Image (spheres, helix red, strand yellow):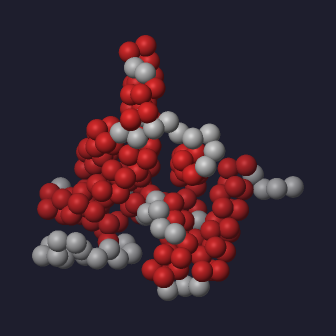
Amino acid sequence: MIVQQDPTPTVVLGQWEEALNVIAIHRDKQLYAELFKYFAPRLRAFGIKMFGNEQQAMEMVQDTMLNVWQKAALFDASRGCASTWIFTIARNVRFDMLRKKQSRKDDISADDLWSDGDYPEQEGSHSQQWDLYLIAEKIAPHFHALPPAQRLVMEKVYLDELSHQEVSEQLSIPLGTVKSRIRLALDRLREAIDGPRS
């Protein structure tokens, strides 16, 4: 459980899942504030990468966390962890925001979507990150089927944006094990989306 006195609580496996259940049942605002404090900066970083715009990123954070408060009762820990559920909500909010912009496409320019003319590169790291996020949209519903060890490594690499070496150090497992779990997870996700290879 969360220690309220600690301004930066240590996250342990199952902590945020339990917090969501308490928020759903008791509408615990203090616990929700702890959840918000932990996830808002991560969602903001995700939003800035997606929109290239601080204002839109913060709008996505607010809408996402409002949905988390309103829909906490819909969270099902048996289908995945809290961070996967919250980031799935964030992706849906982002799609809604982009749909609204698309419906007003005559009123906006590309500069409204990419701040300071920072357009995505056709090649290189920006393009690769964008591709990864688009792939993540498709595979998010299949994350809950991954074995817990593989899912944990995937979340740390793709949601928390840690390097393979950082994941290795954080989980105290060999670097080769991190890479192996990612490869196995990607194979499972590929089969879940495309079907088994013949």
Would you say residue 12 is visible in this rendering?
yes
Instruction: Quadrant for residue 142, please give it.
Output: bottom right
Work out which residue is located at the far right of the displayed protein and give it.
198
The quadrant the C terminus occupies is: bottom right
Would you say residue 76 is visible in this rendering?
no
How many numbered markers are drawn? 0
The quadrant the N terminus occupies is: bottom left
Q: Is residue 134 left or right of residue 26?
A: right
Q: Nearer the viewer, residue 134 or 45?
A: 45
Residue at 55% across / 59% down in the picture?
143
Please state the horizontal and vertical placement of residue 134, each as a whole percent of the image: 56, 44
Say if 59 sits above or below 34 in the image.
above
Instruction: Quadrant for residue 2, please give it.
Output: bottom left
Say if 73 sits above or below 150 in the image.
above
Residue at 58% across / 45% down in the picture?
127
Q: Is residue 152 left or right of residue 135?
A: left
Q: Is residue 20 left or right of residue 128?
A: left
Residue at 32% across / 66% down in the picture?
16
Say if 145 sits above or below 137 in the image.
below
Please state the horizontal and vertical placement of residue 29, each as a whole percent of the image: 14, 57
Residue at 64% across / 73% down in the picture?
179
Q: Is residue 91 left or right of residue 17?
A: right
Please state the horizontal and vertical placement of residue 130, each as a whole percent of the image: 55, 45
Q: Nearer the viewer, residue 85 or 102?
A: 102
